[in-house]
Image (spheres, coloured by chain):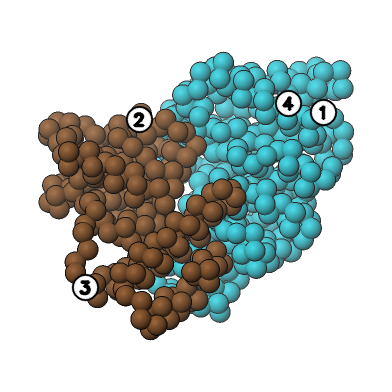
Amino acid sequence: MEAYLKSLFDTDKATALRIVQEALDNGLTPESVIFDVVVPGMEQMIGGMISDNLVTLSQHFLASQIAEEVTDRLIPLFASAPAIQGTVVIGTSFGDFHGLGKKIVTGCLRARMFKITDLGINVAPERFVEAALETGAEVIGVSSMMVHTATSDRGPKKVRQLLRDQGLEQKIRLIVGGAPYRFHENLYREVGADAWADTAANAPAAIAALVKEVRQ
Amino acid sequence: MTTGMDRFAALLTGKTPDRVPIVCNLLDQGAKEMGVSLKEYYSRGDLVAEGQLRMREKYGYDTLLGMFYSALEAEALGCRNIIYADDGPPNVGHLVIGSTGDIKKLCLPEDLGDNPRFREMTACIGLLKRESAGRWPVLGVVTASFSLPAMLMGIGPYMDLFLNGDTKLLDHLLTLCSQFCSRQIIALREAGADLIVYVNPVASATFITTSKFRELALPWVIRDLEHPGPAGVIFFNGGGKINPILADLKRHTGLGAFYLNPFDDIAEARSTLGPDALIAGAINDIRLIDWSPPEIDREVERLMQIGKQAGGFIFGTLLMPFSIPESNIRAMMSAAVRYGNYGSEGSCANQN
C-alpha cells in the first residue's frame, strides 16, 4: 500500500499499474484490489494532500484515471456483481469545453461503484434531463469551468427549471462542480443545484447523500 | 499628474509611488461598452482598443490590456472553430491535435501577421500605445509553451501526455509551442506592448507538484524567455496557485514580477522572493459578482494592508467575469485608490 501511495503522489502511472498487477498475481481478489487498495489509496492520497494544502489536479487526474481503468478491468472478474451505489448522468455545461474536472469525477465515481453515463462536453440542459430519464439516473452532475457557463440560462439553472417543470425534482437531484464554485462557495445555490463537491474525492459522498434522499 | 506609467516606473526603480498601481483585467466588458456583440468586437482591433481606452477612462485603473482572448493562439495554430458566447470569453471549439499523429503534423505559421485575428490584435496594441502616449503601460499577453497544448489537444489528453506519454513527442510539441511563445513575445513588443503577461496555469501548483514543475515545466519557462529575454515579463498564475514555485522561478528565470492567485499568501511570496521582485496580489474577482460594496471595501482594504506592508506591490484582478456589475467594479476601484494610497511618501496630484 505504501508503494502504491507513493506512485500516486509521484504521478507515476506505470508503477501504480505494476503494483496492482503484482497484487493480483500474488493472489489478492479483484474485489480486494479495488476496495482495499485502489479506492482507499485514492482517498488517502487526496485526504493527505488536502491537509498539507498541496493537492494538485495532476494527482487527482492520475489517481482517478488509474481507479477507472483498474475498476473497468476488474469488475467483470468479481465473484458476484457489485451493488450499484447510484446512477448518475454527468457532463459539462452548455458552452463549456473543459472536460478535465468531469473526467476526474467520473473516475472517482466508477471506482465507488456508481453507474455513470458521461454525456461529454458542451451538453444542452435538455439533454441532461432526457438522459437522466432514459437511464433512470438519480443524480445529474453538471461541471463548469467558466463563470458564464456556470451561471448562464443554458447551464444548471435551466436543468433545475426543466426538472421543476416536469415534476422531477423528487426523483432527480442536481449537483455541480468546477472552478467557479471553488472561488464562490454559495454559487451552487444560486444556480439551483442541490449540492456541490469541492474536490473529485468528495463527489462520491456528496452524490451518495443525494441518492439516499431520492430513494427515501 | 501621476500616471500608471509613473507608478510602475517607481516600483521598477525601487521607489514608492503615490499609490499602489491597479491592474483591472476587463476584457469582454469592452464589447458591452462599445454596444456590439463579442464576435464583432473581437473581429476588429480598433473596436477593442477603443473599448479598452473607454473602460480605463471610466474606472481609472493603471494599465491598458492589449489582448483579445486566449483561444486566439489556438486559432493561429490551426483551430478552425471558435465558439462565441454572449456573456463570456470565446472558447476553442475544435482541437488542432486530435491524435498523437497530429503532433507530428503541427506547423508554426511562417509569419504571425498572416493570421488576420493576430494582425487585428497587434493593431489594437499599436493603437493603445499611441493613444496612451506613455501614460498607461500597455499589456500584451502570451500563453506559456507548457500551457499552450491544453488549448490545442484538451487538458486531459495533454496531462496524459506529459505524465505518462512519449517523451520525444512531448518534447517535439513543447519545442514548437516554445518557439511560438517566444515569437509572440517579440511580436507583441514590436507592436507596442510595454509589459508582457506570461500566462502559465498548467505549470501552477494547482496543476502539478513542485517536483514535476522543476522536471517538466521550468525548463520550458527558461526556454520561452531565452531569446526574447525576461525584461518586463510578468509571470501570471492563470487561475492557479504559484507560491510553491516562486523560489524556482526566481532562481532560474530572471523574471522580476509575479502575479499571485487570490489564495496565495502575499507575505509568504515576499519572503520567498526577497525585496526586489514585484508582486501583484489578486482579489477573488468571482466574488465581485455578488459581494456588497462594504464587503468589497473590506476585502480590498485587507489586501492593500498586506500588500503595502510587503512592498513592491501591485493590486490586481484575475480575468474579471462578464457578470460583475459596474457598481461593484467602481466600488473595487474606489477602495483600491483609497486604501492603496501611500500618503506623504508619494506625490498624489491626480489619482486617476
Is B1 left or right of B30, judged from the image as shown? right
Label 2 Cα neighbours within 10 Å, binned few <14 / some 14-19 / many ≥20: few
Q: Are marks 2 and 3 in contact (CB under 8 Å)?
A: no
Q: Residue at x 73, y 56 (%)?
A: B249
State the SS at label 2.
helix
Residue bearing mark 2: A189
Q: Is residue B260 visible?
A: yes
Give residue A141's position: percent from left, percent from top.
29, 46
User: Which chain does cyan denote in the image?
Assistant: B
Marks 2/4 in contact by CB < 8 Å: the verdict is no
Residue B17's disc number: 1
Residue behind mark 4: B305
Q: Are marks 2 and 3 on the same chain?
A: yes
Per the image, the residue denoted by label 3 is: A79
For residue B339, which quarter of the picture? top right
Mark nearer the N terminus (1 vs 4): 1
Mark 3–mark 1 distance (CA, rounded to whole Å)? 72 Å
**What secondary structure is found at the residue carrying circle 4?**
helix
Q: Position of residue A80 (x, y in %)?
A: 19, 69
Q: Is residue B186 left or right of residue B83?
A: right
Task: Name the amino acid type tagged 2.
Answer: Arg
* Mark 2 / mark 3, whichever is N-terminal: 3
Q: State the image coordinates of residue A55 (x, y, percent, origin top left).
A: 54, 52
